[in-house]
Image: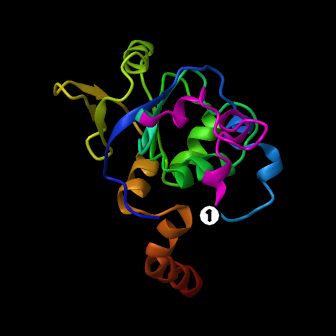
Amino acid sequence: MNPVTRITSRTAVLVDENIDTDRIIPARFLTTTTREGLGQRCFNDWRYLADGSDNPEFPLNRPEAKGCAILVAGRNFGCGSSREHAPWALLDYGIKAVLCSEIADIFRNNALKNGLVAIVLTADENRWLLAHPGIELTVDVAGQFIALPDGTRMHFTLEPFARHCLLEGVDQLGYLLQRSDAITRYEHQEHAA
């Protein structure tokens, strides 16, 4: 995992509410234990037509959404079943941050553990962003704010441990491995006593 300190990108917008994890990555694609290639199946049933061609009605298929790394979504994003594949698919697709007024807790925890910045905004802030697709934002993880084009800031809070892991570019195991010397010293002290 690479450190995530700042993300600057135009926004792509999905105004739909209650986008569940099965809509993000359908269950039939959960047969893999690796992240690579899941981006091709991200929003699969919404993104493609029955013949496999791009659905021109899907917002992320529109030219103005190409290359956007910040996704603004309608309320209750990531609801449904718990699956790490959902944040993996979004990351592999190129999404680095999800902004929403309500994000399912399990999805948010999975996202943050895997380097996908999942930010809960106020309902008013989220409505404003949904109404202004394609604007360039900077998500500052260290400062815990989103900078709008006019310099206005929207502040957010991340759980301190998740924020630390994002800034350091480590997951929970990486965090423990960074402290292996201290853990070994502690274990030797316990057995010596």
From this view, report whether residue 188 is shown above or below residue 105: below
In the figure, is residue 146 to the left or right of 80? left
- Residue visible at 56% across and 39% down in the picture: 108
Q: How many marks?
A: 1
* Among the 4 quarters of the image, the one containing residue 34: bottom right
Q: Position of residue 159 (x, y in %)?
A: 45, 41
In the figure, is residue 112 to the left or right of 158? right
Q: Position of residue 146 (x, y in %)?
A: 29, 33
- Residue visible at 80% across and 45% down in the picture: 27
In the image, the segment drawn in magenta is 36-63
Q: Is residue 41 magenta?
A: yes
From this view, report whether residue 68 is shown above or below residue 151: below
Q: Position of residue 126 (x, y in %)?
A: 42, 19
**Mark 1: amino acid:** Glu
Q: Which is nearer the eye, 176 or 93? A: 93
Q: Which is nearer the eye, 185 or 77? A: 77
Q: Position of residue 5 (x, y in %)?
A: 31, 52
- Residue visible at 62% across and 39% down in the picture: 107
Which residue was labeled with disc 1? 36
Secondary element at image label 1: loop
Identify the image quadrant of the C terminus.
bottom right
Q: Is residue 84 visible?
A: no
From this view, report whether residue 62 is shown above or below residue 18: below
- Residue visible at 37% across and 62% down in the picture: 168
